[in-house]
Image (cartoon, coloured by chain):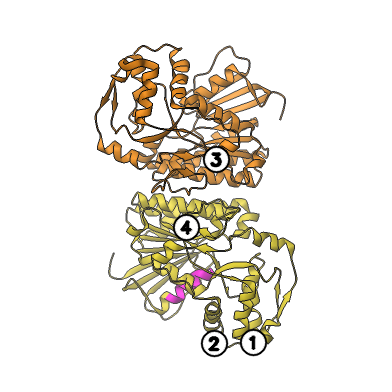
Chain colours: A yellow, B orange
Amino acid sequence: MSDNLHVLITGAAGMIGQKLIARLAREPRIGGQPIGRMTLVDVVAPETPKNISPEVASRTGDLSLPGEASAVVADSPDYIFHLAGVVSGEAETDFEKGYRVNIDGTRFLFEAIRLREYKPRVVFTSSAAVYGGPFDGPVTDDFQLTPHSSYGVAKAIGEQLLADYSRRGFFDGIGIRLPAITVRPGKPNKAASGFFSSIIREPLVGQNAMLPISDDTLHSHASPRAAIGYLLHAATLDTGKLDQRPNLMMPAVACTIAEQIEALRKAGGDKAVARIQRVRDTLIERIVAGWPHQFLAKRALDLGFVPDKSFDEIVAHHVEDELGGKVSA
Amino acid sequence: MSDNLHVLITGAAGMIGQKLIARLAREPRIGGQPIGRMTLVDVVAPETPKNISPEVASRTGDLSLPGEASAVVADSPDYIFHLAGVVSGEAETDFEKGYRVNIDGTRFLFEAIRLREYKPRVVFTSSAAVYGGPFDGPVTDDFQLTPHSSYGVAKAIGEQLLADYSRRGFFDGIGIRLPAITVRPGKPNKAASGFFSSIIREPLVGQNAMLPISDDTLHSHASPRAAIGYLLHAATLDTGKLDQRPNLMMPAVACTIAEQIEALRKAGGDKAVARIQRVRDTLIERIVAGWPHQFLAKRALDLGFVPDKSFDEIVAHHVEDELGGKVSA
């Protein structure tokens, strides 16, 4: 590697991609080395930060189309954050697109790296969607991968590819299974999990939010800030410590909806809490019941990944990072 | 399904393929229904049985090449036994060929079935190679898949695809993880596992065999006859009982080399046992030490898969099926 690092980010227009770019724009270093260049790729033009020290190149392209993957690694980037993918809902409704983008796109990228014959660090964002029930308590590091969605299947396949390419020395890879990202910034969306963020995000700006499930439901969360921390820690971790099992569940804060609401009360008071409207939705209840609720991510914790301390801290990060510290419940 | 079943077998020229064909030639029924047609596919022309009741079509083709997969399912076979694949040694030395045949070949076949919009039973032969150590005792049904070979990775990916295609209703699939097949008929080969069969097969025909590891090594085996039984049971099993986890470890007989040798003694006497030459090979010792030694295949047993009763029975099957009942130690 040269002194000035070249960082490639796929899926750069997505929420995590944008947060990672902003972080690297603020602190343009990985493992103490300065970043000289960032290449940002997505199917829509990613927003690029202005007036930062690394040279930034933005590229619109789909890794699952011929030639694109080899083009994006043509300059041998030292660090590759592979975040690109079709989200779970779309991968379920559009089977062919999901497989093409999530499986072929990942494989083509890995192949392009192999054929360049160099050995970059590759950080792949997998997902807790690789787990499918029945669950017998919290998910442990060695829980088998039996996804209940095509999105989860594609992530599980990406993990297998990453492990094999790493074992064979084609690159130096690590896969991290992200939990639900809460509080997700932006507008409400139609994801079945959307309310976990909505019930915090909307009340803190004086808007109402719907809560479709019961208060005692347990779920696990990581803030966008923690997720970016996971990505950057994965980038510099000694992969020799992974014992040929380079795919890791990330830690998360497990809490009930009631605990989420109490964290909201601390940040926004009773007025914010009153913005939550309980509208039971049995379909969403059933979907959420099928998800894993809690992760015992011992390996990741032992390897130094740092989760949020509590749901209170998750809300505090949101207020700081998204609302400029100002709550307007 | 029509009354007269159409059965497709891929990898029909391989050892398991040939045994399955012979069995279906003798008993041309699945689940009580008569077989009207068998389509046999392999990259080399499979041997085809003569003078049997089903009509037999033999086809030379590679499922990973364009058009081949859709051609083999063009007549909508009711049962598909997908056995085709590059073996583990070759998949490790020829990475591109292994991925092409073992991953693309499987995916193209599954895609061809999906695009025909019918719902055959698909039986996929996975392998114990999906497991990679460290192992903490016997492998249980829920042991995570962390293969240490590209062959194992391709099988793990095939399993994920099978589960997703089945979950989505594109076909009615079941994957079975075969253990080591012992006694493997035929000539000695260079597989690291070859001696497990050699030390039985060669002495029973008056030839010497090398034993490279110590007598107390534990390993697990299924006879070719048991493996064919697994395939046929998988073909008719109620897949509704699989709880969306359609990939199953198969049961196997766990025994030490010393127990294998005692079974040989019963079948061929001291003269046969004297044919075993101990030539320690530390490389093979290390490879074998990395394999799983024992499987607690509770799910498969509960679902009615019937293993060999003992290693004695495995030897007896070999003598009956391969030697016409005659030992010539």
State the residue at coordinates (39%, 45%): B148
**Mark seen at residue B51:** none
Q: Real-space Cα distance between discs 2 and 4?
A: 36 Å
Location of residue A135 with respect to B219 vertically, above or below: below
How dense is the environment of label 2, judged by Cα within 10 Å: few (below 14), some, or many (20 and up)?
Answer: few
Q: Would residue A82 be seen by someone viewing this image from the given angle?
A: no
Mark 3 — residue? B298
Nearer-N-terminus badge (2/4): 4
Residue occupied by mark 2: A325
Q: Chain of mark 4?
A: A
Same chain assignment for discs 3 and 1: no
Tag 3: residue type?
Lys
Q: In the image, which disc is placed on residue A269?
A: 1
Q: Secondary structure at mark 3?
A: helix
Question: Mark 3 near mark 4, Cβ–Cβ under 8 Å?
Answer: no
Marks 2/4 in contact by CB < 8 Å: the verdict is: no
Q: From the viewer's perspective, is the residue at label 3 or at label 1 nearer?
A: 3
Q: Residue drawn at (47%, 20%), measured in percent from left and top?
A: B317
Which quadrant would the N terminus of chain A be assigned to in this image?
bottom left
Mark 2 and mark 1: Cα distance apart in space: 15 Å
Q: Tell which subunit mark 2 falls on.
A: A
Secondary structure under the numbered disc 4 in the rendered image: loop
Q: Residues within 10 Å of mark 3 (few under 14, many from 20)?
A: some
The reply to whether residue A299 is in sight is yes
Mark 3 and mark 1 residues within 8 Å of each other at the beta carbon: no
What's drawn in magenta, residue-wise?
A: A13-23
Q: Are marks 4 and 1 on the same chain?
A: yes
Within the magenta stretch, is there residue A19?
yes
